[in-house]
Amino acid sequence: MQTLSVNLGDRSYPIHIGPGLLLRPDLVLPHLIQKRVVVVTNTTVAPLYLAKLSLALELADIQVDSVVLPDGEAYKNWETLNSIFNALLTQRAERKTTLIALGGGVVGDLTGFAAACYQRGMPFIQVPTTLLAQVDSSVGGKTGINHPLGKNMVGAFYQPQLVLADTDTLATLPDRELSAGLAEVIKYGLIRDLPFLEWLEANMEKLVARDTEALMYAIYRSCQNKAEVVAADEHESGQRALLNLGHTFGHAIETGMGYGVWLHGEAVSAGTMLAADLSRRMGMITLADVDRVKTLFQRAGLPVIAPDLGYDAYMNYMGVDKKVEAGRIRFVLLRKLGEAYISGDYDAVALRATLTML
């Protein structure tokens, strides 16, 4: 097991990464206010891991209740969130009861948002079971739900007590979901960690083949990058926005195509290619750099061509992005590979060219 910390003063918390962690209640117990938890999971993950986690906790004399949600991005909404509240009230969960999110990014976001709201705040723990959740969404305290007009537009910053990333859960992850997670892994190399980007170029086939050592390293290095950024800018007032490389375009893709049609990581991959193209048109990176990014995403099994929603639709969806400031869309762009920046000072002609080449 490897451990690192998200340093937020008295709200700091550990990230444990390694195999067999679902069977380690000793890692959970120090973070419980009372020996009672409610595990929130979904219909896909529950048959695989709910009984295993519940039994391990119960053997440590922890009372366990559970909530099983429908699976998919399409259910990341008010109705599903309310079903968590219904369950918590029915089970008479208390403010000191701990919620445990067992699943991917949708489960983690919903559970965290429910924890932030229920009785005005209850503790929660992230137990991510997908690569994307282990390297990104479980770390940093972003929680929320989608709105028909925009992805993740309703939510709260609310940090977990603990992140428990059991790498054994990746064995049951479908190939498409694994690839989606690799999009977020590649992101860290592109925005701030060129040596990691170069390592990914040298080891992508190992990651796709689920080599245990390679995956452990990629997860640790990704979480290390994210933890450093979150510690410096918890509420995304500055550099944390760099973590959204490809996301402004990507969220437009997810909203425009219908939530769940494209996986989040797939949309981020195609969105990052649009951001790279715009960066090239603005004279910051070369065509060779764009091709290098494209090749790496392709080797990860990810789409590199965004759907043609039309220029007006893209602009409309991106206009409700959380990075919009004073009515102007702000993009994360690449100054060079391994160094990103965020700005609303983009070339409008270049942006139109990027979006009309589809």
Image (spheres, rainbow, N blue to C red):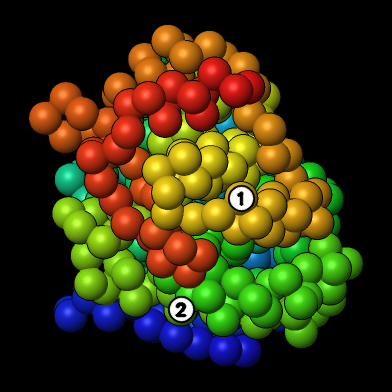
SS of the residue at dot 2? helix
Quadrant where the image shows the N terminus: bottom right
Q: Is residue 4 visible?
A: yes
* Spot occupied by residue 129 in the image (x, y as percentages of width and height): 65, 59
The picture quadrant where one finds residue 83 is top left
- Read off the residue under disc 2: 224
* Spot occupied by residue 177 in the image (x, y as percentages of width and height): 73, 48
Image height of 179 relative to 247, above or below? below
Q: Is residue 92 visible?
A: no
The picture quadrant where one finds residue 87 is top left
Residue plotted at (42% across, 49% down): 283
* Spot occupied by residue 144 in the image (x, y as percentages of width and height): 36, 39
Residue plotted at (38% across, 83% down): 5
Residue 321 appears left or right of 314: left
Residue 214 appears left or right of 79: right
Observer-nearest of 284 and 15: 284
* Spot occupied by residue 170 in the image (x, y as percentages of width and height): 75, 63
Observer-nearest of 210 and 204: 204
Residue plotted at (23% across, 39% down): 344
Mark 2 is on which residue type? Gln
In the picture as drawn, the residue positioned furthest to the right comes out as 209
Mark 1 is on which residue type? Leu
Along the polypeptide, which appears first: circle 2 or circle 1? Answer: 2
Q: CA separation, marks 2 and 1?
A: 30 Å
Observer-nearest of 340 and 54: 340
The picture quadrant where one finds residue 37 is bottom left
- Read off the residue under disc 1: 287
Image height of 160 relative to 109, above or below? below
Q: Residues within 10 Å of mark 1 (few under 14, many from 20)?
A: some
